[in-house]
Image: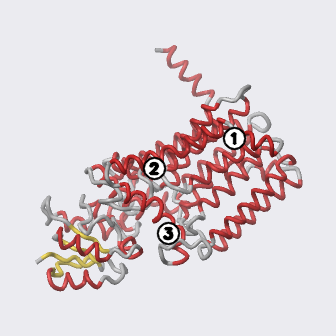
Amino acid sequence: MMRWLKSLHNYCNKREWILFLIILVLVLRLPSFIMPHYYGDEEIYFVMGRAWANGLPLYKAMFDHKPPLIYILAGIAPTMLSFRVVLALVMIIHTVLFYKLAELFWAKTRPFLTYVSSLIFVVLTTLPTFEGLTVNAELLMMMPVTAAAVILWKTQTDTRVRPYNFLFAGLLGGIAWLFKIPVAFDMMALGLYFFVFKQKTIKEAVAWVLSWSFLAYAFAFVAPLALTFVYYYLKGTGPDYLATVVSVNLGYVSSWSTSTYTFNPLKSGLVVRGTILLVCTFLLYVARKKLDKRLVFASLWVIFSLFGALLSARPYPHYLQELMAPLALLLPFIFVAEKVMSWIVIAVIVLLGGLTQYQIKFWGYPTISVYKTYIEYVTGKISWTTYLNRFDNATRNYKIASYLNERMTEKDQIFNWGTDATIYNLTNRLPSGGKYIVSFHIRDLNKYEYVMEQLEINKPKYILIQPGSGEFLALTALLDHQYALAKVIDDVEIYIRL
């Protein structure tokens, strides 16, 4: 026993920093383990997950526009707490992987920057400022990408080329792609660096692009998503899945700028941003021999991940999580860059960041208040009711759920016309208006007629109308003829079927 404890002690002594980072991740994430149901995207993922767990075909019987992996994780997790615990475990693994990447990055020249870089990573990926405590696809998808980066970086020390390393790296990226589409640009950056930028001449780069290693990388990256198409077609829901992953996502790219789901790369700014990306990539390629290879790698990854984060030009801060791993590698160069060319590269990236914020105006969320509220609650200074009041609409939603749960039988259904899907999860119900969970999906995709058909078939006992959810004339007419107002809770109207 003592021998085992001594071995454990020695093991921990050699890994004090990584153990510190893991503890820091857990401590900073403590508030998320007691947070109520409150966050819009999490609630949609959880509705999708419960639908999948109940055997409903995703995309045909329940809709959201992301690939399936985040919904499957939500379906495996029986509660919102366990869903957030899954995220915490993913981020612990991601932290270990990033530490390894930072170590490979800095160990031979400036080992101290391994600690700086990994600490920056933990802070940026955890603090609520960038929605680090909420389950989102960006946090989940970047862990496999960092793992791929570790594998690819280690290939530089191999004495001979091993295509299976590139195959495994591509496969990890393909798994990440099943969380969200923009991750393709991260994998594109990694591929560009290791197959093109590292080569001395264009001829060598072409040879590498035509090699078995590149073929293995590209094939493995595409394979997981391709297999999902095969799977859903065999399940009979292929057209719905294809329409969601391709046409809906293309429309989503333009919807913030155009207010429609019609793909418009000019009006959405995609062409302009794509041109800037191409120019920056070309200039970085030309200057690569005069720069530290690590700076080239980090810069290339940052600009491609920035492009991925800006695909839809939405100002949601969790989109920026796509940049955090490469940014944590890049930021230490501010302290060690010596060449003028290095400072020019850093200045250009800072300028791109400034222009992005000027145009997109990314939001930020309070951070200190989240931890202050958590401490007040766990120390008994505030009650659960007061704690709920600190979260948007949480008190309202819990009161509504309590009211409905006291009155509904197991077979009763509900329909919620609004942008907040929380009520479905608090009542353990799925939407009776068909596959669309929130009002903005129905509005954006113009599915009013479809919803009305489903309501006539399912005849929900309760229909909820949330304030600010928009006009739905056919639904109003249905309420006038077949429902009566039963209760109003914090401006949410609850109608009961006559």
Q: In which quadrant is the C terminus drawn? A: bottom left
Residue toward you, 34 or 238:
238
* Structure colour scheme: secondary structure
Q: Which residue is mark 1?
A: 210
Mark 2 belongs to which amino acid? Answer: Leu
Residue toward you, 495 or 68:
68
Mark 3 belongs to which amino acid? Answer: Gly
Q: Which residue is mark 3?
A: 251
Cα distance between the residues tagged 1 and 2: 48 Å
Mark 1 belongs to which amino acid? Answer: Leu
Res 30 label: 2
Q: How far across and how far down the image is residue 187, in percent?
A: 61, 48
Q: Is residue 143 visible?
A: yes
Residue toward you, 26 or 472:
472
Res 136 label: none
The secondary element bearing badge 2 is classed as helix
Cα distance between the residues tagged 3 and 1: 33 Å
